[in-house]
């Protein structure tokens, strides 16, 4: 139970109502990783419907970033990319495009919005159907759905799985701090061991894309 006292500003979960999210952050972070793995491995309704999905190649992602930068996008305050000029980020993406394209040989269904506010968890007995906080909202489904899964599939595409991992990692960092990313990757690899070892080049590259687009096409 919450003791009602304000959290120090340096606390990575400051602002979260801990009584209305799963028992601890590790549960929520692990659920996010497993939900992404289920999509990528075809163990979710989205992941099993590859034929209907548009493709999002790394080169397509660069085009989306180019359009955003041309429209005046700048990284918000607090973003790790805030000190970097958008044109420089675009140049980094261009420089790494061939390398990422060469490595991204495992196109899979991706959700695009692999985020906490798009996550559905099974509803524990006696808990409300909706939990929320200043930072995130958690939906719970009383139906028999394979937990966990996602609500909004509007940004789904056949793409590099690191598209989702980058978006999920950014949300974990923003909500719980950078140290919590290890919990995300551990849960993902446990659910989808075929991706081990993780590729830092692709993760870093798609993290720039995610910073600009939020995972959207």
Image (spheres, grey):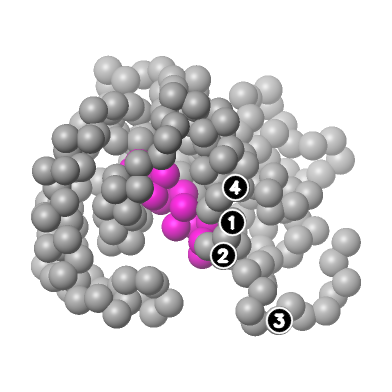
Q: Nearer the viewer, residue 103 or 50?
A: 103
184 sits to left or right of 3: left
The residue shown at (68%, 22%) is: 144
Q: Please tell me which of labels 3 and 2 falls first in the chain.
A: 3
| Residue 46 lies in quadrant | top left
* Identity of the residue drawn at 65% across and 38% down: 121
Label ID, residue 180: 1
Is residue 45 positioned above or below 23 on the image?
above
Mark 2, Cα crowd under 10 Å, few <14 / some 14-19 / many 20+, is some
Instruction: Find residue 118 and report its horizontal and vertical position in percent.
Output: 51, 46
- Answer with mark 4 or mark 3, whichever residue precedes in sequence: 3
- Residue receiving disc 3: 8
Q: Which residue is mark 2?
A: 177
Kindly state the secondary structure of the residue where label 1 is placed.
helix
- Which residue is pictured at 28% across the width and 28% down the height? 107
Name the image quarter holding residue 191: top right
**Labels 2 & 1 near each other (Cβ < 8 A):** yes
Chain part drawn in magenta: 162-174
- Marks 3/2 in contact by CB < 8 Å: the verdict is no
* Mark 3–mark 2 distance (CA, rounded to whole Å): 14 Å
Q: Name the residue at 80% across, 58% down.
A: 19
Q: Are marks 1 and 4 in contact (CB under 8 Å)?
A: yes
Question: The N terminus is located in which quarter?
Answer: bottom right
Residue 181 at x, y percent in the picture = 53, 53
Question: Within 10 angstroms of label 3, few (less than 14), some, or many (20 or more) residues?
Answer: few
Can the viewer see residue 112? no
Mark 3 or mark 1, which has the lower sequence index? 3
In three-dimensional space, the C-alpha distance between marks 1 and 4, rounded to whole angstroms, equals 5 Å
Left or right: residue 40 versus residue 142 is left
């Amino acid at each position: 139970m919450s003791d009602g006292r304000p959290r120090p500003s340096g606390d990575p979960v400051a602002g979260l109502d801990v009584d209305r999210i799963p028992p601890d952050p590790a549960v929520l972070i692990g659920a996010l990783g497993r939900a992404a793995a289920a999509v990528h491995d075809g163990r979710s309704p989205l992941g099993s419907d590859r034929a209907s999905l548009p493709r999002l190649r790394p080169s397509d992602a660069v085009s989306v970033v180019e359009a955003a930068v041309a429209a005046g996008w700048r990284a918000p305050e607090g973003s790790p990319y805030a000190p970097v000029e958008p044109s420089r980020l675009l140049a980094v993406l261009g420089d790494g495009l061939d390398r990422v394209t060469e490595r991204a040989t495992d196109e899979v269904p991706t959700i695009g919005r692999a985020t906490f506010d798009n996550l559905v968890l099974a509803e524990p007995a006696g808990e409300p159907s909706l939990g929320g906080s200043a930072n995130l909202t958690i939906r719970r489904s009383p139906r028999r759905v394979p937990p966990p899964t996602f609500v909004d599939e509007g940004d789904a595409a056949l793409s590099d799985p690191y598209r989702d991992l980058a978006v999920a990692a950014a949300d974990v960092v923003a909500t719980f701090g950078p140290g919590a990313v290890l919990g995300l990757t551990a849960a993902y690899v446990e659910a989808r061991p075929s991706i081990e070892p993780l590729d830092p080049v692709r993760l870093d590259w798609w993290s720039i894309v995610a910073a600009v687009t939020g995972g959207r096409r």
